[in-house]
Image: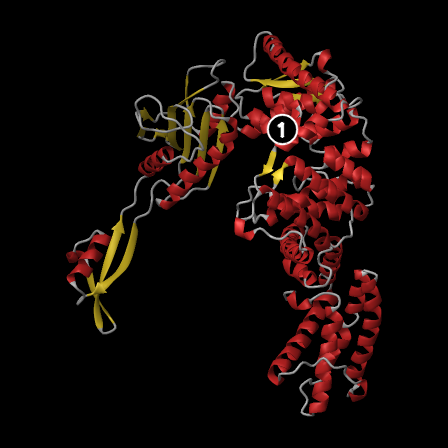
Amino acid sequence: MPDLLIELFSEEIPARMQARAAEDLKRLVTDGLVEAGLTYAGAGAFATPRRLALTVQGLSAESPTTREERKGPRADAPDQAIEGFCRSTGLTRDWLELREVGKAKVYFAIITRPGRKAPEIVAEVLEAAIRNFPWPKSMRWGSGSLRWVRPLHSILCILTDEAGAEVVPLEVDGIRAGNTTQGHRFMVPGAIPIGSFDDYQAKLKRAHVVLDPAERADMIWAEATNMAFAQGLEVVEDRGLLAEVAGLVEWPVVLMGSIGEDFLGLPPEVLQTSMKEHQKFFSVRNPKTGRIEKFVTVANRATIDNGATILKGNQKVLSARLSDARFFWENDLREAKAGMGAWLEGLKAVTFHNKLGSQYSRIERIAALARDIAPLVGADADLAEQAARVAKADLRSEMVGEFPELQGIMGGYYARAAGMPDAVADACAAHYSPLGPSDAVPSDPVSVAVALADKLDTLTGFWAIEEKPTGSKDPFALRRAALGVIRLLLSNQVRASLVPVLVDPVRRNRAAMAEAGAFPGDEVPDLSNDRVEKECALVLAADLMTFFHDRLKVFLRDQGIRHDVIDACLAMPGNDDLTLLVKRAEALAAFLKTEDGVNLLQGFKRANNILTQAEEKDGVEYSFGPEPKLAEGAEETALFKALDRAEAAILPAMKAEDFAAAMAAMAALRKPIDAFFEAVQVNSENQIIRRNRLNLLHRIRAICGGVADLTKVEG
C-alpha cells in the first residue's frame, strides 16, 4: 500500500492562517480520497511560512469495483418516468432488468463502477482541494485563474511504495506536480529531490527547514528560557505569541537583546505589549524586581556574526517604539496627577451605545450600582463609588489609545499617580476581570464591587434594549459578562439575591434609553410612574436571571455536575442566590453518587409515580396528613417514624443551609422506604387505608422536595 506525500510551496503564508490551512488540506484531501473509494491508515499535516505539507500513510492502491442495484418504476409506468430513471442511472432501457415484485413487474438497474488507480484519484482530489481551498483571504497573480493566499510556486505530489516513488500526474493552472522541494530561502536555495516523507523531513532539516510547527515552537521556547536562566532572568510566557513566531520562521535562531536604560522605568505591561504588538518580541523579566529588562527575538536564519547585526537593527527599531511609549506615559502621568478631569469630561463625547448614551453616563450608572453592591461584598461604599467613577478614565489616555488591550491596567497606574487609595487603583486595574474562563478573579472587596457593577450594567443595559445573544451570535460578549458575574460571586462566596439587585440598574438603563431617544415616539414610558417601572424592571430582571441560570448550567457542567441535578436545584426557592444554588447542587450531586442516594432516588420516583397516577385517576390531591394509627404492619409504622425523624432533621438543616446534613437525613429514608414497598400494597381494597397510604407517599414527596425537586433528576 503506497504512502502519499503532498507539498504546496508558495510565498509566505500569514502565521495566523497556517494551522487552520494545514487542517483544511488534510480534511479536503482525506475526505476526497475516502469518497472516491480509497482507504488509508493515517495522515498528518504540517505548515511552515512557505509550505503546506500532507502525508497519508497506507493508502490503498486502487478503489474497488462497486455494484449498485437501484429499484425503478413499474413496467407499466409512463414512458417519461422510465426514461427519467434511465437518465439518472446512465443506462438505456435495454440494460434494465424486469423483476416480479408482488403482483407487478418492476425495472431494476444494475450499475457497475470499475475501480480506479490511486494516482488518478489523487490527482482529481488534490486539484479540487487546491482550486476550492477555503483561505480567509486569497489573491490571483499573473494571467492565471487560480486563487491562493500568496503566489503558489510548486506542487510536490508523490506516491511511494516498495518499487520507489511515483510522481502523480497533475497540473493546476500551469503548475505541474513534481518530486522536488525547496530548502531555506537564504541558507540552502535550490531544488531538492524527494523520495518519501521520511526523506522529505530529513532533507528539509539538512536544508535548514523544520517542518513541524510544534517542534519549532519547542526549539524557540527551550533556547529562550535557557538563555534567560543563564542570566538569572525568566521569559514571560505567552503561548499565543510563541505560536505566531513559530509560524514566521522555518529555521528559528533565538537572540537576546537589552532594553535601553531610559525605558526600564516604563510599566512592565507597557514594555511587554509594545514589544509584542510591534515587533513580536518576548519579554524577559528580572524575577527579583519584576522589571522587564531584556527581550528575545527569533531570526529566520543563522549568520556569520551570530545575529549581532540583526540585534543591532532590532534594538534601533525598539528604541524608536519605546520612545513613543515613554512619550505617551509621561503625558498621561501629567493628566493623571491633575485629577483625570479632562479625560472624564472627554468621555461625554464617547458613545457607549446609541441607545444607552455616552461612556460618561454609563460611568454614572456603574458608580451608583457599585455603591449599592458594596455592602453585599463587604466593600467600603465610598471607595467603590470612587473607583467606579475613574475606572474607565484611561479610555481617553494616549497609552490606551495606542494599546487598547491595556485599558484598566493603565487605569490602575494612573489612579495611583493621582494619589488615590490602593483599593481604588486595584479596582481600576481589575474591573474588567475575569475576561475568560481561565482569567484570575478579583478578591479585594472594592475590586469585586466595581467588576460586578461594570458587568451587571452591561447586561441590564442590553437586556433593556432587547440586544440579547441569539444562537452563536453574541456581538457584545454578554455570555462572557454573565460568566464573569457568576465567577465573581462564586469565587468570593457572595450571598445575594440577584433579582432585587438587577431592578435598579434596569431602571437606570431605561432612563438612559429615554434620554437617548431610543424608545419609539408612541412608546415612551412614563418613567415617573414608580409602580409600573418597577414591575417592568422586575420582568426584565427575571428574564435576565434565566440567562444567568443557562450560563451557570454550562459552567457547572464543566465542573462535572449534571444538568438534571442543576435543574432539580433551580426548581427550589432562592435560585437567584447563585452561591446558595451551587452549594445545594454540589451537595445533591455528591449525594446521588452514593449507593443510598441512588436507591433513595428510585424509592422516591416509585412513590411519586404511584401518587401522581392515583391523583390523576381520582381527580384529587392527596396532601392531607396521614394517620399513624391506620398503619398496618411494622414496615408501615417504621416509615411513619422515619419520616418524623427525617423531617425533624431536614427542616433545621435547610434553614441553616447545611445541605450535607439534609442529604444525610434524607439518606436515612432509603431503607424504610424500600421495606415499605416490599411489604405493603399501596392501592389497598380498603379505601380508607388506600387514601392514608397515598397521603403517606405525599409526605415522602414533600419531605424530599424540601431539599431538591427530585422529579427533575433522571434515573
| Apparent side of residue 251 relative to residue 161 in the rendered image (left or right) | right
Give x and y (percent) for residue 705: 72, 69
Give x and y (percent) for residue 403: 63, 25
Q: Give the residue furthest to the bottom.
A: 686
Give x and y (percent) for residue 360: 67, 35
The quadrant where residue 620 appears = bottom right
- Observer able to see residue 234: no
Give x and y (percent) for residue 598: 70, 66
Above-or-below relation of 314 to 355: above
Q: Residue at x 65, y 65 (%)?
A: 713
The quadrant where residue 320 appears = top right
The one of 709 and 211 positioned closer to us in this rendering: 709
Above-or-below relation of 128 to 499: above
- Observer able to see residue 548: yes
**Which residue carries the number 1 mark?**
404
The quadrant where residue 539 appears = bottom right
Q: Secondary structure at mark 1?
A: helix
Above-or-below relation of 42 to 417: below
| Apparent side of residue 165 relative to residue 183 in the rendered image (left or right) | left
Q: Quadrant of the C terminus?
A: bottom right
Q: Quadrant of the N terminus?
A: top left
| Apparent side of residue 675 relative to residue 473 in the rendered image (left or right) | right
The one of 14 and 100 positioned closer to us in this rendering: 14
